[in-house]
Amino acid sequence: MIVLELGELEEFVDLALGYGETLGVPFIEVRLEDDSVGEIRLEKGEVKESKALRDIGLAVRVIYNGVSGFAFTTRLKKDSVEKAVEKAFQAAKVGDRISTLRLPFAEYEPVVDNPPIPPIKLHPKDVSFEDKKDMVMRAHESAEDHGKSVTSIIVRYGEAYGTKIVVNSEGTRVKWNPWTVEIVCAVISRKGEVLADAWERHGGSVGLEIFEDNFSPEQMGKNAAKWAAEKLVSKRAPAGKQRAIIDNNLTGVLAHESFGHQTEADLMISGAVILKDKIGEKLGSENVTIVDEGVYEGDNADSNRGWWCPYDDEGVIAEKVVMLDQGVLSSSLNSRGTAKYMESKPTGNARALDFRFEPIVRMRNTYFTPGDLSFEEALELLKDGIYAIDTMGGQSGFDGTFMFKAIRGYLVRKGEIVEPLRDVAITGNILDFLKNVEGATRDFELHGGYFGGCGKSGQNGLFLADGGPKLLLGGDGVQFGGEK
């Protein structure tokens, strides 16, 4: 698949911009996207599904007296583009007559930029289908070789890349080339009535060379098979409140699902979340700091790049936002519309699933910052408890409650990992969780990729990343569901 240069397509951006000014639109924003996606799914050693799609479209948003009107078109012709502008303008004027909530845009200095992507060796557009198929085959074969009582092996590869340009009537013109890739290897083993599943995954805005270096398909397949086999002989997690160590993956999900959504300014404004009007309050221990940013540039950035998002879909620089600073709620995540209402500034958090949707407040790379403990030191401080790893899904409420099922876990006694566990379900409230964090490890992982993504307001599957260190949870611990 080849992504063409926008060249001739960009003229439609200027056409929409000029036509809006001709109509007397007070503010117009135009977003053009040229996206390519590809998937391979391997099951029972055979390719069961593959696809390669290209999606091009233009979105128009008009702001009129603090009310937005939105339209899009996939037909890049003069009449279609002009019609989209007219529809957006008309929608804004209709909204002006009936809207009870107005969010005038905060001022923002116009930006003109076309940032290069971070250095990588193998961009997915430059790698053949056969080479990508070979990667998933190698993971599948490795899982077969290392598995026990395996009933199912599914390996999936996914990629998305393209070009995005955002311009507006204030003079902003930014263009960038986002991309993400991911490999997931899932294994199910069975022994009698016990079914055990596990997976290994890696991805983000990285080059495919990452799967030849730190995260080879062979190692991913081996890990997934080994972990599934291990769970066949494991016992259920003990029920009740337990001290715990939460691994990097599960830490990231908690940062995103249970806390990050609470800081999205549109939800704060609506009063839907418990963190409304709590900025400046101490919510957790001094050991917890939570950040959301567009481009991760910390240690080991090559393998922890997450989701590369230098700008949001309003053309605002995707700034680093410290939402929770050593336990204190310090900032919300804002679009240009919510920033003025919140008496803050735009943070570059206005994002849309694609050109068919209007930007709303969304996260980018959300994570707990690392601490100064080694994993061995964290185990020693834990003494007795549970080490919970990754998650295979769950739910989180606006009241702060959460329930997640860890993929796997281990029982810890006297600072030593003693046996594997299964059915490790974790429940609690994020505010209680934050207060009980006694420390964080130095190691840091940021996980992004093609599969999954975030859902909000009907925009499901938005690319992003989350992560952090391992967190030591003391105090009253956290509630585990399992065997009493």
Image: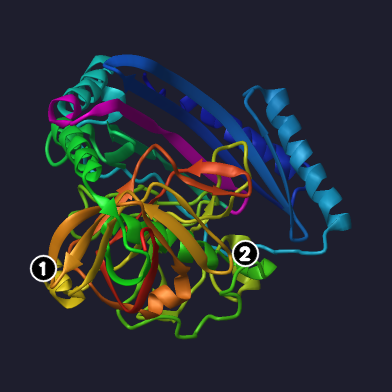
Mark 1 residue crowding within 10 angstroms, few (<14) / some (14–19) / many (20+)? few
Task: State whether residue 320 appears in this view.
Answer: no
Q: Residue at x 68, y 30 (%)?
A: 81
Q: In terms of depth relative to the viewer, which is nearer, 81 or 340? A: 340
C-alpha separation, residue under disc 1 versus residue under disc 2:
40 Å
**Is 104 part of what is drawn in magenta?**
no
Residue furthest to the bottom: 281
Relative to residue 258, is residue 220 depicted above or below?
above
Question: Which quadrant does the C terminus fall into?
Answer: bottom left
Q: Is residue 141 left or right of residue 353?
A: left
- The amino acid type, in three-letter code, at marker 2 is Leu
Q: Dot 1: what SS?
A: helix
Residue 60: image quadrant is: top right
Q: What mark, if any, has residue 376 been given in the picture?
A: 1
Q: Quick check: is 152 in the magenta stretch?
A: yes
Which residues lie in the magenta part?
A: 143-170
Question: Which residue shows up at 47% across the image and 52% down it?
Answer: 394
**Residue 267 shows which numbered tag?**
2
Callout count: 2
Q: Nearer the viewer, residue 172 or 255?
A: 255
Residue 144, percent across and down?
A: 18, 25
In contact (CB < 8 Å): disc 1 and disc 2 = no
Measuring from the top left, give residue 134's x and y in whole percent. 21, 19
As drawn, the label of residue 336 is: none
Q: Position of residue 211 (x, y in %)?
A: 18, 34
Q: Position of residue 471 (x, y in %)?
A: 27, 68
